[in-house]
Amino acid sequence: MEIVPGIHRIESGLGPRFMCQYVLTGDERTVLVDTGLAGTPNEVIEPYLRSIGKSLEAVDEIIISHADVDHCGGNRSVRARNRRARFFCHELDRRWIESNQAMLAENYRWYEAYGFGPEAESIRWMAAELGGDCPIDWGLRGGETLRLGGGWRVEVLHLPGHTLGHIGLWDERSRALVLIDAVLYDGIYDRAGNRLIPPRYYDARAYAATIRSVRSMQPDVLLTAHFPVMEGSEATGWLDASLQFTRDMQAAVDQGIDRGLTDLAELTRYTDGCVGPYPESMNELGASVRAHASVPRVG
């Protein structure tokens, strides 16, 4: 649906939960934010574009928010349909977004060196849904603006933490922030309201700083990939709870270390017992645990 003038949210299934891509339609340019999984462009994005009088071939730019399978797995499919469109991402995430091999090894399977990680079935699924390598045309840094039409520009924001190069889009006109996965509350839930997946972030300080920065902007509308549309005080409360989760994580990790847990797998399982449990992708909590373990204590 069109959430605010010119910003459309496309929601589709991702197992028991959902994922979203966004389309920005100006009178001069059409921008797609994220491509979903390998089949998402043809199965989900294209039908929606057709419903609003657009098409994949009419998209001018594709902005990839960050390096994760459900956000860039459809890149190659879009490229095959539209050779003239330009692909953008943050320079820090470019390596993983361009290379399926690098994404699997460095984003999803690095845990294996510590004795845990995704199951073989999950690895096969990710390898298939990444959809094949696809080059990025322009690397962003944050602070760039993109013109969509007369009087309408959106700003690219660097929102690091979840990944080092996560980006979002700020629309001053409607005070809407396309946040995607830059903030992840206390985890991702299924449609029935059950918590499934932990918030994964690689830099605890940067992640907390992103939450504070977003809150200070006081967006009227908050648009994510895996949560409902939030407005006003609901968005503020959600951001506050997300920040509190980082404090709870830090306390749990510090407590585990004080108990002599130095092995990452053991410390992750302990932390899951404190802030979880997370029945799916629990291994991804290990990234956040490692990030908090590296934060020096004060005093």
Image: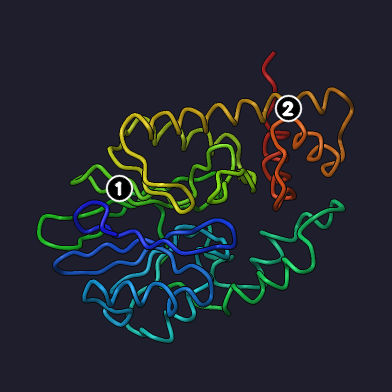
Q: Nearer the viewer, residue 171 or 121?
A: 121
Tell me the residue that label 1 is attached to: 170
Placement of the C terminus among the 4 image quadrants = top right
Establish if 298 lies above or below 218.
above
Placement of the N terminus among the 4 image quadrants = bottom left
Instruction: Name the element at disc 2.
Output: helix
Q: Residue at x 27, y 53 (%)?
A: 3
Q: Position of residue 45 (x, y in %)?
A: 38, 72
Instruction: Name the element at disc 1.
Output: strand
Q: Residue at x 34, y 67 (%)?
A: 32
Q: Are marks 2 and 1 in contact (CB under 8 Å)?
A: no
Describe residue 214's horizontal placement relative to residue 232 as left or right.
right
Describe residue 174's horizontal placement relative to residue 161 as left or right.
left
Colour treatment of the image: rainbow
Dividing the picture into quadrants, the one containing residue 245 is: top right
Q: Position of residue 96 (x, y in %)?
A: 59, 65
Question: Is the residue marked by circle 2 packed among few (<14), some (14-19), or many (20+) residues within 10 Å?
Answer: many
Numbered mark located on residue 273 in the image? none
Q: Residue at x 36, y 85 (%)?
A: 83
Q: Amino acid at mark 1?
A: Trp
Labels 2 and 1: the sequence-earlier one: 1
- Asked if one can make out residue 202 in the rendered structure from this viewpoint, the answer is no
The residue sitting at the top extreme is: 299
Describe residue 149's horizontal placement relative to residue 70 as left or right.
left
Numbered mark located on residue 252 in the image? 2
For marks 2 and 1, give the CA distance.
34 Å
The label nearer to you, 2 versus 1, is 2
